[in-house]
Image (spheres, coloured by chain):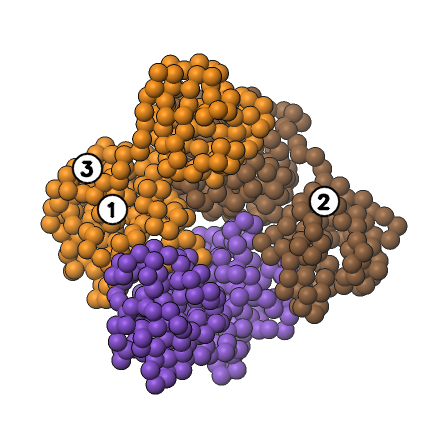
Chain colours: A brown, B purple, C orange
Amino acid sequence: MAPTPWISFTTDYGLADGFVAACHGVLARLTPTTRVIDVTHLVPPGDVRRGAAVLAQTVPYLPAAVHLAVVDPGVGTARRAIALAAGDGLLVGPDNGLLLDAAAALGGVRAAVELTNRDWLGADVSATFHGRDIFAPVAARLALGAPLADAGPAVEPSTLVRLPVPLVRPEADGFTAEVLTVDHFGNVQLAASGSLLEPLPRSLRVERQPAVRVHTFGDVAPGELLVHVDSTGQVAVAVNGGRAADLLGVTPGDRLRVTAG
Amino acid sequence: MAPTPWISFTTDYGLADGFVAACHGVLARLTPTTRVIDVTHLVPPGDVRRGAAVLAQTVPYLPAAVHLAVVDPGVGTARRAIALAAGDGLLVGPDNGLLLDAAAALGGVRAAVELTNRDWLGADVSATFHGRDIFAPVAARLALGAPLADAGPAVEPSTLVRLPVPLVRPEADGFTAEVLTVDHFGNVQLAASGSLLEPLPRSLRVERQPAVRVHTFGDVAPGELLVHVDSTGQVAVAVNGGRAADLLGVTPGDRLRVTAG
Amino acid sequence: MAPTPWISFTTDYGLADGFVAACHGVLARLTPTTRVIDVTHLVPPGDVRRGAAVLAQTVPYLPAAVHLAVVDPGVGTARRAIALAAGDGLLVGPDNGLLLDAAAALGGVRAAVELTNRDWLGADVSATFHGRDIFAPVAARLALGAPLADAGPAVEPSTLVRLPVPLVRPEADGFTAEVLTVDHFGNVQLAASGSLLEPLPRSLRVERQPAVRVHTFGDVAPGELLVHVDSTGQVAVAVNGGRAADLLGVTPGDRLRVTAG
């Protein structure tokens, strides 16, 4: 494939150690003209679901890129290391479900390989830092235009590890949906697509709390609960000038019932 | 105007979501050769004053750039979206006072426009993420050299929303000034310009606490309170090896009295 | 020397102020084609040992670069500002021990100078922000290819300030070693080289707690304590899916005894 000038980079490495920089260094050595867009490195440690959600909601806005993502509690065990082709992008990371929502957002998996080609890696591969020793070197070579098939043997996409599908259940007077993410502002994003809000009236309840269906935060008074279609097209619950997650006492994986109120 | 190779980027988006990266992606797609200097994305949510102070104190050290800044609690409401020309820079963000201190630091507003040209934006503009959908696309086009006047109609600078001017009151034996910022080290920066310190002796009081007027932290013993002209030219109160904000129990907006002691 | 296209950047400045960006701006103005790899800016304030450890463990993976590092509690006092040549890199920062472990990791100090050439600096040098006013300008000029000797007079390497060597004591049935770092995941890295683990059996004790010597986290059950050679070659204590530092109640500088168990 043609070289791509961009690599995106998502991990749970945090920003206080040198882990992210070591990977940037590996990329810089192998493909110095490629530029890196850091998606986030603050995925909670080992939280594959959160990593998958952030990556999937961000890739539609990134340029064509190799998307390097490492949230990898099974590092060094038998879990596969993989690369996927999807839309105009390539994704590189562990086979634990982290990459598949992003692949779907890019247009679906076109091809998948297991990263077994040791010629692409350095002499020493540690048992615990595959971001630096496997995934970054592979991402760099793909960014340089190496064929995906050279990274290792094809993997049947149906065998890729998938995360459980979050619950969304339409009901007579609304719906129940799992909390997908809580963002920096405390906004509560539900697994429900925005279309589920269409049949509902302006006056709603989120569990027992009254809420208003509006377009943006400032459409309600400060401190009031609102329900809206967020910037990714999902239903989200927010508080104007406040933190809905704190008000509702919810975290990702919890369920919320939204009904005509 | 000539294209500028730099965009600076300041928000309250935090680093744990994909918001910053989505904006980087929009910039990378529209103006791939422009490079981005992230000023900070840890402005406390909705704290326009803090965002304005950090940006104003940083722009003098940045190269000529389009300064993209989004701390925008009024996103999606009737508040205007604006771009300003100031000195060798352009500033893009909400009309809520965020940009004006930086514009002053760059030499003052030369021109202002309201961002109403929908041709510069994508097909879908969300109600809650104008950083991605309005401000970043506009910053990219300005970085590419598009004329400011093409972004929308001129705005009379006197109509721009301004933040309240922080209190600074010279007194017989010193001055009272509002706390402008508290930095990562707990240093307390006052709204007072360094020149207010000139008439005062070496021995001072900050409220009732004894303090010494010196040049740098190590000029006093560890744990001692000092008053100095900080690296931006403002009066600041610090503790050698400690956190003055904790010792004094102050946060931005509080007032401190500095007097001959 | 030939220009180098990379600068690495390590500080305790935090990410909430404009300090890091001001330095990026100084670099961008002086050497616009150089690219910066941020190692970390979350070294705890003034923690020179932590900064030294992170930098030393990261530089082996970075491209040839000028390594700019500022953890500088003595800023503005008589401590020297220095630049070192080591391996294919140059290091710039305060003479407080911060740079020497990284210099050793790069191959040892080949030359050292004190940064006294005021022609390389701007007109105004603040008393408290030498990262912006001294170290960044010097790093930029070195990245542009200026000779190290032009930065100031040679310094005898034996006179450079050194950090205390952390304790590592081999014992009859194992070893005692100081905690060198605790990473984002709570992994406890010891000052002991991985070779100290070789003579020990699979079944170990860390202080009184049973632990297993394995290759990676997933080799033990979730919640179990393990001892392994980490990705930098040091002995480290970890918990599969947990935080060893919390389980053991240790922080850097504490000592741990690892014995056949």
Disc 2 crowd, CA 10 A, few/some/many (<14, 14-19, 20+): few
Separation of residues labelled 2 and 1 (CA atoms) = 50 Å
In this view, B120 is above or below C241: below
Mark carried by residue C96? 1
Front residue of A229/B44: it is B44
Classify mark 3: helix, strand or loop.
Answer: strand
- From the top left corner, tell me how far across and down residue B43 is, in percent: 50, 61
Q: Amino acid at mark 1?
A: Asn
Please state if C114 lies on the left or on the right of B23 as rendered.
left
Between discs 1 and 3, the one toward the N terminus: 1
Disc 1 is attached to a residue of which chain?
Answer: C
Mark carried by residue A254? 2
Query: Mark 1 or 3, which is nearer the eye?
Result: 1
Residue position marked by numbered label 3 in the rendering? C109
* Discs 1 and 3 share one subunit: yes
Front residue of A157/C134: it is C134
- From the top left corner, tell me how far across and down residue B88 is, in percent: 36, 70
Q: Amino acid at mark 3?
A: Val
Disc 2 is attached to a residue of which chain?
Answer: A
- From the top left corner, tell me how far across and down residue C47 is, in percent: 35, 46
The quadrant the C terminus of chain B occupies is: bottom left
Mark carried by residue C180? none
Separation of residues labelled 3 and 2 (CA atoms) = 55 Å
Quarter of the figure with residue B190: bottom left
Residue at 40% across, 82% down: B169
Classify mark 2: helix, strand or loop.
Answer: loop
Quarter of the figure with residue C99: top left
